[in-house]
Every structure is written in structure tokens, then in C-alpha cells.
Image (cartoon, rainbow, N blue to C red):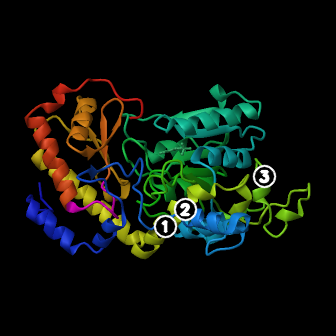
Amino acid sequence: MELLFSQTREYAEERDQRDELRSYRREFYIPEGVLYMDGNSLGLLSKRAVMHMVEAWKQFGIDGWTEGDKPWFYLAEQLGGQMAPLVGAKPHEVVAAGSTTTNLHQLLATFYRPCGNRTKIVANELDFPTDIYAIKSIIRLKGLDPEQNLIRIKSEDGRYLREEEIISAMTEEVALVLLPTVLYRSGQLLNVKQLTEAAREKGVLIGFDACHSIGAVLHQFHAWQVDFAVWCTYKYLNSGPGGVAGLYVHEKHHSHSPGLAGWFGSRKDRQFDMDHTFEPAGSAGAYQTGTPHILSMAPLSGSLEMFAEAGMERIRKKSLVLTEYLMQLIRVRLDGMGFTIGNPVEEERRGGHVALEHVEAVRIAKALKAEKVIPDFRSPNVIRLAPVALYTSFADVWDVVDRLKRIMEERTYERFQQERGVVA
Ligand SMILES: *Cc1c(COP(=O)(O)O)cnc(C)c1O
């Protein structure tokens, strides 16, 4: 095996010195003494997330909608414009709104229009549950049976999906395909471009759930002609628990009325006419519903500034180097300890986290927490470790593997109970 990195901690420190993005680490609140490897579940709070919205509320009261340096009335669209480069979209194709789940409901209600024989939705058996629940409920709302109209692509090994298999399921009975960009458990990055081209050729609409890729992986949604997408912002984008999510709709669809209409989807210049005839905005803004959750957007505006400065290319590059480094340390230093790397190793198929499998994963995850390493456990046997480009150092990665090694050698995980916590 060819080793790309040296094994010493000095080497990790030296890599940190050379890291172009190292200054961003100081921009985050990292809990004292903690190695935080869970930025793929809940990103850390950035110091720039100063609560300007609270300040504006104090200072302006209702006039905060139009006054101050970030008037609330335009904030959802403004943040959409700032997120657009992260997904490779035009500014007016993206808006900050709702949650991933409500945005899924919105865009399924907008784009799932079963007609004649085309009534089926293609998803997959490794999907995040909320995506499946949303799909089943929209099928039922259209008066159809999910048993007959939801196709869940199977995974041979319980980890990965094969693009060819998804493509061959895009038959003339399929109305819509909804897929994750990156699978939440194994971290497999699907070939979004290939899948989108195939869907277009076959006359099928395609949407993506980008929760596990936004802020970690590069996308070209507009150029690839992805029809629509949704994502949350509290993972790699650090917007905080329940932070306002994002949605993208390709501009060629902006004439489609939203399936779930609400007054904040109105043309901005007409919204306060209070007319009972809805005039949707000619942008992704049309797919908002009610008053935006302004206070839950404040952290995002701080975090997105850093993404713009650092640039997604550099962020993706560092993320790939960190996950490569982590995988190498695991292979070399934890050899023979029963671990399997359960994520794709190729760069073009790898998301932002490493999926470490072990039969004792539950107890090892607990032992890691006791050692001040914050991993994330996914039942039954996966420990997800996400080194985040903006705030994880090479030395952190080295220390995580070092602590893991100690936990395995000293078998300290045996002191913990085998069942998982409520939030795992
Ligand atoms: C985190 C995540 C969600 C979460 O949806 P919410 O509506 O924010 O609770 C949905 N889908 C995927 C793939 C996720 O990873």
C-alpha cells in the first residue's frame, strides 16, 4: 500500500501550518478540549453568526422588515443568492425556506403530477426516512397507492447504490425520481450529472436531497439541469438546530405554480396588495409559504460569508484530503482491530464523512464520547466521522485515531451498554 501521508503527529501539525483554510478554525465555537467530528449532523456555531436579526428587532421593531443592513423582507432571497454558488445555481434559482421535509413536500406537490401511465416515483431503500414518508404521503394525497407507485431501488450490500440500476428503473411509468446526492449513512456520492442526463432523456423529472453534500461537495445543478433540490443548513452550513433550509428550482420551471401556495411566495412588489389572486414570484422564491423564520436565518448569514471567502473548491479539496488522511490512519493504525471502511474510497464517489463499521460500533461510539471525541452513530454498526474543512485540523484527525486506538487496545468500550441513545 502506498502511503500518501506520514504517520506522526508532527506531520499533522506541519500540514496544519500549511493549510490555507486554517484561519477559519478560530471563527467557530469549538467546545473546550473536544474533538468535534459530527459537523455532518450539526455544524458548529460560527462567531460571525452575530445575531444581527435580534439587534434589528431591538432597534427597529416592525421596521426591521425594511430597515437595517439585512432587511428581513428580502433575507430569504438574499441567502438563496449566497447559497447558489454552493449548488452551482443562478441566484434566483435558490431560496432559504422551511425545512428539508417541508421543502420536499412543497416540491413534490409542485412536480409530482401523475398522468396516464406515468405515476411512479423512484427512490431507494437506503433513503433517509423523512424522504420516504414525504413521497408516500404525496402519492396518497394524489389518490394513489404507495405500494404500487413507490419504487425503492435496492442496494446489494446495504451501503451503496448503482447508478445503472437507478437509470434502468426510469421507465415510461415513472413520473419523478428523488435521490440523495450523498447517502447519509455510507457517504456515497451519486453521479448527479449522469443520473440527471438519463432522467432528461427519458422524460422523467429528477430532484435531489442535498443535505449531506451542501457545503462539502461541489454541485452544478443548473448546468446539469437538475429539476429541483432541497437541503438542510444545520449540517455542513452551520445554521444551528432547526436552522432554515434551502431549495432550488431550475429556472425553466419557474412558471410552475407552487403545489403549496402561501403569501410569501408572491411577487414581492405585489405581496402587500393583499389580493386574493396569488401572483407567484418568477423565481425560486415562489416556493416559500409563510413568514420566513428570520431568527433561524441569522447564523446562516454569518456562515455563508465564510463559504464565499474560502470558496467551495478549496473547501472540497481540503475535505477530500482530510477524509483520505483519516482513512489512511485508520487502515494503518487500527489494522486488525475489526474496522471496515464502509464509504467509497474514490474521490468522485466520496462525500464529506468516513463511515467506519464495527460490530461494537455502539459501544465504541460511547467510549469515544467519554474520551471527548464527538462522533455520530448510525444503527446498527456505523460510526460516522466528519472532518469539516472549515474547522477540523489534521491534528484533530490524528488525535481521533489515536484515541480510537487506545479505546480498542484497552478495550474500554466494554464498560458501556450496548443500546443506542434516543438521538443517535
Ligand atoms: C438531515 C437530513 C434530513 C433532515 O430533514 P429535516 O426536515 O431538516 O428534519 C432530511 N434528509 C436527509 C437526507 C438528511 O440527511
Q: Kindly report the distance in space between the C-alpha atoms of the residues bearing marks 3 and 2.
A: 23 Å
Q: Residues within 10 Å of mark 1 (few under 14, many from 20)?
A: many
Q: Nearer the viewer, residue 317 or 171?
A: 317
Horizontal side of 305 relative to 332 (left or right) equals: right
Tell me if I can see residue 108 in this picture: yes
- Element at label 3: loop
Q: Earlier in the sequence, mark 3 or mark 1?
A: 3
Residue 262, numbered circle: 3
Q: Quadrant of residue 271?
A: bottom right
Q: Nearer the viewer, mark 3 or mark 1?
A: 1
Q: Kindly report the distance in space between the C-alpha atoms of the residues bearing marks 1 and 2.
A: 7 Å
The residue located at (43%, 70%) in the rendering is 306
The residue located at (77%, 64%) in the rendering is 281
Horizontal side of 391 relative to 278 (left or right) equals: left
Q: With respect to residue 118, does 345 lie above or below?
A: below
What amino acid type is highlighted by mark number 2?
Answer: Ala
- Element at label 2: helix
Q: Which residues are magenta?
A: 387-394
Q: Give the x, y percent position of residue 67.
A: 69, 73
Tell me whether circle 3 and circle 2 mark residues in contact (CB < 8 Å).
Answer: no
